[in-house]
Amino acid sequence: MSKIVINTELQGLKLLKRGKVRDVYDLGDYLLFIASDRISAFDVIMNQPVPEKGSILTKISVYWFKNTAHIVKNHFITDNPSEYPEECKPYREILEGRSMLVRKCNPLPVECVVRGYLAGSGWKEYKEKKTVCGIRLPNGLLEFSKIPAPIFTPSTKAESGHDQNISFEEMQKLIGEELAEKVSKISIDIFNFASEKLEKSNLILADTKFEFGLDENNELLLIDEVLTPDSSRFWLKEHYAPGKPQYNFDKQILRDYLESINWNKQPPPPELPAEIIEKTAEKYREALFRIIYS
């Protein structure tokens, strides 16, 4: 098992950002992404880590960066610490298996969400208005129903708290009509490509979110993480049926536990039973196996 990493403290390297899961260091010409074993629920980071989580997220992202480069370029350079700049060498033990060296770019101020099925906030809106992010859908759909064709539903990027869904028109105002159209098309192209690939592994890709940035030449790059259990809903195809809970590969076990103890969803988080941590870890391990190795 790889070393458990909660917070990285890499002396001599410039910490640019500490997110819910990732620590990002500025290496001058490049960025260093490190996926920790932290896990959050309801926008609160738990005190206890999930072993192997960071390495699993990194392996899955690297797999998709390599397999979607024919659709759009991305910021990934290497995940081999021996190829990192010299100042990273003392930290090879921490970086091995859970880090990526990536190109710098200017991230777009939107999350690019593609939905193929009705779930989460999309289902809540549909029940009330028969729309998802303002897009009209047919009557009579159930929770977890397949949408006739994947829809692009952008949201704002929130530094803390929940991202807010926005209309495509609002996105156009933020980044321009031409770029919004391009990002929308590429997002759906990646979603369709991944859906077809995952179906062979008996997985349904219900929805996912992508992030993009522009490099110094204004070229569009796919960035951050791609098609991981933290950014996507995956369901087991053989157990799929609309209107009932799905066999999933995300943090639902953790969320269900936290709901069951009536936690107020504010810091500090409660202590998690070992069984919940292990069951959550098992979901991540199974996702890795199904996505890459099955």
Image (cartoon, rainbow, N blue to C red):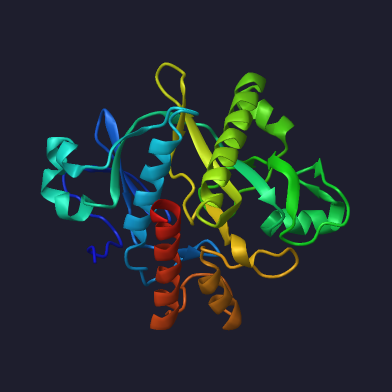
| For residue 46, above or below residue 162 | below
- Report the residue at 67% width, 48% height from top: 116
Quadrant assignment for the C terminus: bottom left
Whether residue 49 is visible, yes or no, is: yes
* Left or right relative to 48: residue 238: right
| For residue 4, above or below residue 71 | below
- Report the residue at 58% width, 68% height from top: 247
Quarter holding residue 56: bottom left
* Left or right relative to 246: residue 285: left
Whether residue 273 is visible, yes or no, is: no
Quarter holding residue 7: bottom left
Percent x, y for residue 244?
Answer: 71, 70
* Left or right relative to 47: residue 43: right
Percent x, y for residue 135?
Answer: 79, 41
- Report the residue at 49% width, 70% height from top: 267
- Report the residue at 46% width, 78% height from top: 270
Percent x, y for residue 164?
Answer: 65, 47
Using the image as rendered, state which of residue 79 and residue 112 is in the foreground: 79
Quadrant assignment for the N terminus: bottom left
